[in-house]
Amino acid sequence: MIEPLIPAANSKVILIVDDDSTMRGMTQLALHQSGFIVVTASDGSEALEKVAQQKIDCIVTDIVMPKMNGIELCSMIRVLPGGNRIQILIMTGLDDLESIQKACAAGANDFASKGFHPSLLVERVRYLLRNQDLQDTLHQSEQRLNYAERLASVGHWERTINGTTQAISPTVCKFLDNKNISEITWDYLCDHTHPDDVPYLKANMEHAIKNFSNFQLEHRYISNKGALRILRHQGEFNRDANGNWIIYSTVQDVTENRVQEERIRFLAFKDPLTELPNRAAAIRDLARLLDYHKDDNSLVAVLAICLDDFNRITGSLGQDASDTVLKAVSDILRKQIRDPLQDLTNNDDPKEALLIAHSEGEKFICIVNHLKFTEAASAIAKRIQRAISAPIKVADMELQLTASIGISLCPNDTQDAHQLLDNAFTALLHACDHKNACQLFSDDLNHAARQRLSLEVELVRAMENQEFELFYQPRLNLSDNSIRGAEALVRWRHPQRGIIGPSEFILLLEEMGLIGKVGNQVINMAAQQAALWQRTIDPDFRVSFNVSPLQFGLVDLVTEIDAAVKRTGAQHTNLEMEVTESALMSDPEQVISILRALRNRGLRIAMDDFGTGFSSLGMLRDMPVDILKIDRSFVKDIGVTATGSAMVNAILVMARALNLKCVAEGVEMDTQLHFLTHNHCNEAQGYLLAKPMTAQHLEHWIKQWRQEKINAA
Ligand code: C2E
Ligand code: CA
Ligand code: CA
């Protein structure tokens, strides 16, 4: 309900128009004494000037005047903007019926005879003004109603049972292509409704009319320009003043609401990047499917799929490229979805997936039903792996991906949707360890998962109890056979299990977010050792330590290293930091600036596992590094295959061109060492020389090495 407004200023302005100054004066006095503001004019044209100058609420005018008479004045006023609002009272002779008729036709509101007592005239004027106020209020209410309707995208429509419009608000006209009231009928609406919705619309309206019952309808309206709107009608029946049944309804444009609702539904159950159903949708559909299959003896398989080494793609090619890859893989997987019309009864071993979903990151879910054997699930997994391994074009490159897959089966493993999915992901964890592998779920895996959990608990304790220590592997300088440094490799001295290597816990520490703290312990231990060996072994002796790419984001490496150097009395120049290319993954600019800062302090940067990532020459140019560590996988092929040796040589040549030093890792054989020396590799490290050992052992080992050298000379 819209309340009337209280008018701001109350004093009304009356214009008296008369060429007779006595009459004018008397009327003026009476109106003035009654509280009105009065202005006067002696004929029609002067009156028009006054109207143009100020707001006039009511005109009291004589008819017969020299320049412009009262009737002409009336007509002129009515065509002025806002002129309709002005009340006009005509003063006539008693018997002048003809003039009265003309004045009314020209738009006068009322008339009074010239002999009228002034106080009665005042009442007439009051009556006219009250009338105007009422009209104003009504007009304002209508305007506000229109405004509110427009804002709420809702209007109203009154029509007869035959469908003829009695009244309609401008908002509804706007919804219906701005047609005017005479054109809008129920039939018009039906003609412009989406053909699929017409039977529903007509049947519901007929039912409502038959029972005079309230109704709510929603349908699609097609505008003349072809745009689709969703209109909602809510109505009831009532009799009008003449006793005829009228349908009163509101009409609302709910297009935007429906679009939003659709979007919310979409977001709740679809992954926005790949537009595949998400994990929640997969669980929902899986639960329904398991229920559907609970009494037949076919199998339902859940395949958890993960792209191997995906963070390398993100790291070297960036987020956009990895999004492109995820979309491409989604398209590949989508093709594995079964044609819903496929005749299952005639097919003994339907292979196609029922549903493909995007779980998160590089992980997908595939659900298959109607399987007769466990092997069928493995066969599907193999096919999916083959499909994924087809080259994918990203920017100017062709990538070849592999995927690991974990499989869980219903009813073999469980009949619960959540558990089935969890089991598939547990199996996936194991498949991922081997890459491009496929792993069926078994209870043993669950046992392994529990073991992992207890390992996590132990790792927290290990960190608090300082159970981590560093082993050192010496690095041989190939130009003069001297030992100039060693790589620090972390070990876990487990109270019961003894020494444990990093492959068993680094990944877990990374996943647990603890790698920052353990990494700091490593930095401190390495600095401590560097400070000591700089005095006891060689002032230029270098200790290199490894950092995980995640450390760049978890701790302030520059501050940590500065503090460790200060605390231990080491020099930055006695330290070397080994980073892998994937360190550039998340925030290359930040990493590069950290590396620069450290390098400016004299600390050397080594690119670890060089050649195994997606490193490009461009990246090597941008990354502030001093040393390339040639990965063991290349060194292993020296002398074994022709390309193996050529590859290592190519890296050495390139490194020289870029002014970088090279360290070969994993040197196990004399042939490798000879090749490396011959091709001017700077340093070598590997079991041929020594395995990683405790600090004490290394000191002893170096003494021995020096002694043997002296003896040999
Ligand atoms: P990496 O940095 O590439 O270290 C070289 C690995 O190769 C070491 O394994 C070393 O023991 C092994 N190795 C050395 N020479 C030979 C050889 O001739 N033959 C063979 N087969 N292997 C050789 P380890 O100590 O098990 O370390 C494995 C990885 O764990 C390291 O690879 C490194 O990535 C990581 N890691 C080690 N210590 C740390 C650490 O303090 N922090 C972090 N974040 N990672 C570490
Ligand atoms: Ca290393
Ligand atoms: Ca390495």
Image: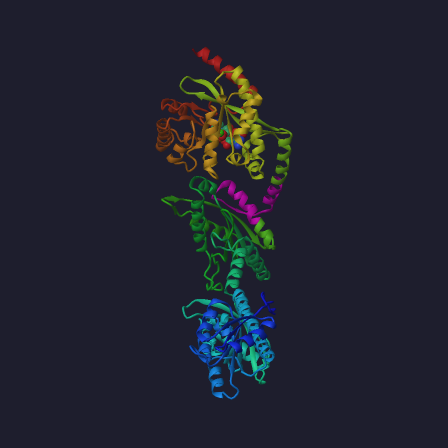
Quarter of the image with the C terminus in it: top left
For the question of whether residue 179 can be seen, the reply is no
432 in relation to 203, above or below: above
Looking at the picture, how far across and down is residue 188, in whole percent?
A: 46, 77
For the question of whether residue 147 can be seen, the reply is yes
Q: How many marks?
A: 0
The residue lying toward the viewer, choosing from 339 and 175, is: 175
Q: Quadrant of residue 638?
A: top left
What residue is at 43 percent from the left and 78 percent from the top? 66
Instruction: Say left or right for 313 vs 298.
Output: left
Instruction: Say left or right for 695 vs 483.
Output: right
The residue lying toward the viewer, choosing from 540 and 42, is: 42
Looking at the picture, how far across and down is residue 118, in whole percent?
A: 58, 79
The residue lying toward the viewer, choosing from 46 and 576, is: 46
Q: Is residue 431 magenta?
A: yes
105 in relation to 370, above or below: below
Looking at the picture, how far across and down is residue 131, in whole percent?
A: 57, 76
Helix, strand or loop: magenta stretch: helix
Q: Is residue 92 magenta?
A: no
Looking at the picture, how far across and down is residue 63, in whole percent?
A: 48, 81
Quarter of the image with the N terminus in it: bottom right
The residue lying toward the viewer, choosing from 546 and 700, is: 546
What residue is at 50 percent from the left and 21 percent from the top? 574
193 in relation to 505, above or below: below
Q: How is the image coloured?
A: rainbow
* Residues drawn in magenta: 423-451
Q: Quadrant of residue 121?
A: bottom right
Instruction: Say left or right for 456 vs 43.
Output: right
